[in-house]
Image (spheres, rainbow, N blue to C red):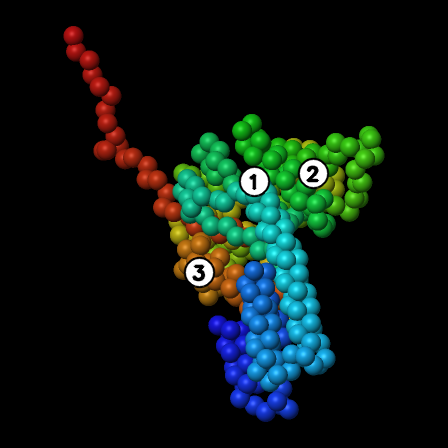
Amino acid sequence: MIPLAMIVVITAADILSPSTVRFGTLLVAAPAITASFAGAWFTGLIGLLAVVAEVIIGFHHHLMGSGNERAELIAMILVSAFVVLFCLVRDRERRVLVQVRSVAEAAQRALLRPLPESLGTLRLASVYLAAAAEARIGGDLYAAVRTPGATRLIIGDARGKGLPAISDAAALVGAFREAARRGLSLPELAADLEDSAGFNPYESAKAWPVDDESFVTAVALDIADDEPVLTMVNCGHPPPLLVHEGKVTPLECERPSPPLGLGNLGGEGYSVCSFRFEEGDLLLLYTDGVTEARDTAGVFYPLADRIAAWTREFPEGLLKRICADLITYTGGRLGDDAAMIAIRRLPLPAAPSRATRRAPPTWRR
């Protein structure tokens, strides 16, 4: 309605004014403004109406035969044509961007499958925040699988930029899911992930450049179904945060392992640490894109202090609060991708007492 109202007002003002006072030249603003929010067809229609309005004004003031009026009319037509051409190019680029986004979203769903709301005795929530405004995926990764009597999770961060980091993350997630099928222990899993992180299928052909500084930090952990304990292998990753009775504690291993891709330690070289994880406890796994986010003064985001005020939240509520607070803290500009998994321990299954156990059936002849 704004460009239509502009054409009507400008035309009326020019007709009601003396011939020495011209407002018709302002009609060019109508198609220019329309191009900012409308497509090529509607912009062309507004440009056509502006040209018609200019002709009406010229006939009203008996100026159609003058050189100035013809020049204004030709300029109006050329400007409208250029604005419509701009709209066509912009719409084509927008369609390409939509296609790229759909491909990125499909890649994200394939690599980072949404975690279910519950697994075993756990309630889960996950989130991925891309640093680039138009990106959907990067080098951060997470996954969760069921193993006999436990839930196994991993979160990691592939160093580097662009496609190499995404390729490393995809290889690691695939190896993690495959290891769950083979029933590997946590040290064996870490050794298997190390092999995947350092494997280059094109090394002999020298067709794929190898980055000597590329590596992956990761935390892999098992949470048992029937006992309040979790076991963990930390390969150079920020320690998870445990919330127990309102107190936030980082789960740090005494002998953390180096990041994946820097040297194979073998299945016996990765130390496993255990921690209590009781009913009602909350566990937060995250990548350094969260803790290394900075405000305008360059101060790092105080994740542990922030979640201390949200200890009663369920996993999905906690992640929503962290994301909103993180965006506000950084002014909407993340310096790196960020991924998080929040886990709440549900009540453990009660062991049947002797009184409630059923006696084996007796058979009588």
The disc at residue 197 is 2
Residue with the mark numbered 1 = 110
The disc at residue 311 is 3
Distance between the alpha carbons at the discs numbered 3 and 1: 32 Å
Q: Nearer the viewer, residue 67 or 348?
A: 67
Q: Residues within 10 Å of mark 3 (few under 14, many from 20)?
A: some
- x and y percentages locating residue 102 in the rendered image: 57, 47
Q: Sequence order check: which comes first, mark 2 or mark 3?
A: 2
Q: Amino acid at mark 3?
A: Thr
Is 212 positioned to the left or the right of 349 in the image? right
Q: Amino acid at mark 2?
A: Ala
Q: Nearer the viewer, residue 99 or 140?
A: 99
The disc at residue 348 is none
- Quarter of the picture holding the C terminus: top left
Q: Residue furthest top?
A: 365
- Residue 228 in view here: no
Q: Nearer the viewer, mark 3 or mark 1?
A: 1
Q: Secondary structure at mark 1?
A: helix
Distance between the alpha carbons at the discs numbered 2 and 3: 35 Å
Q: Sequence order check: which comes first, mark 1 or mark 2?
A: 1
Q: Residues within 10 Å of mark 1 (few under 14, many from 20)?
A: few
Distance between the alpha carbons at the discs numbered 1 and 2: 19 Å
Q: Secondary structure at mark 3?
A: loop
Name which residue lies at 48% across and 62% down.
321
Q: Sequence order check: which comes first, mark 3 or mark 1?
A: 1
